Amino acid sequence: MPAPRNPWLALYALVVGFFMILLDMTIVAVANPVIKEDLNADINKVIWVTSAYLLAYAVPLLVTGRLGDRFGPKNIYLIGLTVFTLASLWCAMSRSIEMLIAARAVQGLGAALMTPQTMAVITRTFPPDKRGAAMGLWGGVAGLATLVGPILGGVLVDWKGWEWIFYVNVPIGIVAFVLAAWLVPSLETHQHKFDFVGVALSAIGMFLLVFGIQEGGTRDWDALIWLMIAGGLIVLALFVVNQSRNTGEPLVPMSLFKDRNFSLSSLAIAAMGAAITATFVPFYFFLQQVHGMSPTRSALVLAPMAILTGVFAPIIGKISDRMPPRVLPTIGFAVFAATIFGFSALMKPDTSIPLFLVIGGIAGIANACIWAPLATTATHNLPIQQAGAGAGVYNTTRQVGSVLGSAAIAALMSSRLAAQHLPGGPVMEGGGSGAAKIPAPVLDKISTALSESMILPGCILLIGVVASALFVGHGKAEDKAPTFEKADIAG
């Protein structure tokens, strides 16, 4: 059967897999206390379960966008989906924290192969003046998956155990593969050279920086840690120099950043990725350890955020086509930052849970104002031949933000717990009834440490406010994108 010519059907097929890989960015957050207890790990190793996924996801994105241009987004997407699904099975079968971390890294590699292809297909099949609605769906899925992850994770952990947050990916991955193979067209490919020096510099720099930040507290911020952080920054600076001097095909085409809105969108989405990741870890530890909630109950506290993001994102995506690009994301970032500071102020043992529900609902509407408008603004002026590279860079900045947010919140939580004379110990004897076993004075100290940690993502979101406020208006949209009728839709 020939592939359908309606680009929406292809997009629907792609977002099934896209939803799944983004779900795995946050689904582990609510299971962290249970994984820690079951695999007898310390808090830093447990957070590496998330960081390993994010790091392996972030680093290859720069080249996987090019792979889609060279070999076809459909083919690379299907390969990535296969890797991701098999790695999910490996995660579920892991019986040590080290094996789980390794499996999560392979899972992240599969996700890196998939993600740029979804944005590239949108850019190459929807004209600029219609991309807002398509990006509305894409952004809604991104925001919803990020927020639904902890809810689904909580249900699965309470029902069957933490392994099932990974087992569930197997049937979803199979369905996603069949849908993509059937509905996604085989688009025209472009010849590319691959910048292996750039890949090596970006991978080494990111690893040194993230490992140094996250392990700093464990090693008491000794000379080796500072050497790794400084080395990572130096290597990343060399990467930027290398890219700017590359006269062939650099991994990051610096010409992309001549577009002001693309540059600012990349900065803003990095802030969003960092803030989301840095919010969930302390918040779910607070709900489970201080309020004694089960994983499911703690995840449901943010249900209003997830629901309202999913409801409003497609609507706001359509509206964003008719508004100046700065308006919606600036409002969204400002309101989202205010809600995170609100969470921080309210994180006390005697706070009424309904207050968190209300603030979470407001945060959900704010999220809807961010995801789709940012993606639309970033890709609006990209030429077709740079669709894969642009999608790779945009998604890379989001993932780089996420992995830095994960590393930073791990270091900050350890620091704040130590400041309360709680060096990683009392927090964290599993979830559920944990609060009943911890004396009230200790609960107060834990609350203080975790609430202080929540200030970090609120401050990060202020970067998004500034970046979004500096967007400039779009010129007249030109239909530069080929439709499905113009593309090769064989198979």
Image (tube, rainbow, N blue to C red):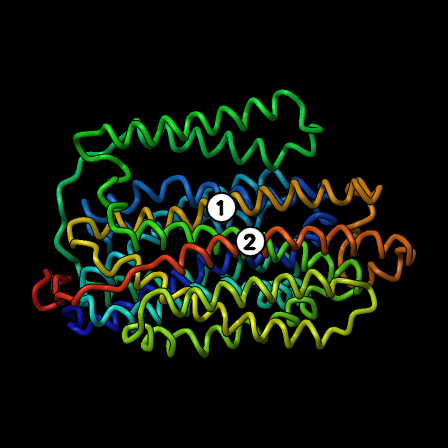
Check the picture and name the quadrant holding the C terminus.
bottom left
Give above or below for 164 relative to 393: below
Give above or below for 85 relative to 483: above
Cβ atoms under marks 1 and 2 closer than 8 Å:
yes
The amino acid marked with disc number 1 is: Leu
Q: Percent position (x, y) of residue 442?
A: 88, 52
Q: Which residue appears at 21% of the width and 57% of the height? A: 381
* Between 176 and 42, the one nearer to me in the picture: 42
Q: Residues within 10 Å of mark 1 (few under 14, many from 20)?
A: many
The amino acid marked with disc number 2 is: Thr
Q: Percent position (x, y) of residue 399?
A: 44, 48
Q: Return the residue at label 2.
A: 277
Looking at marks 1 and 2 on the same chain, the residue that comes earlier in the sequence is marked by 1
Secondary structure of the residue carrying tag 2 is helix
Evaluate whether residue 446 shows in this view.
yes
Q: Percent position (x, y) of residue 127?
A: 17, 67
Left or right of 296: which side holds 14?
left
Q: Return the residue at label 1.
A: 54
Q: Which residue appears at 30% of the width and 40% of the height? A: 63
* Between 91 and 26, the one nearer to me in the picture: 26
Left or right of 216: which side holds 391?
left
Secondary structure of the residue carrying tag 1 is helix
Left or right of 315: which side holds 461?
right
Hey, which quadrant is residue 279 in on the image? Answer: bottom right
Q: Percent position (x, y) of residue 109?
A: 41, 44
Give above or below for 204 relative to 449: above
Evaluate whether residue 84 shows in this view.
no
Q: Which residue appears at 29% of the width and 73% of the height? A: 133
**Residue 74 image label:** none
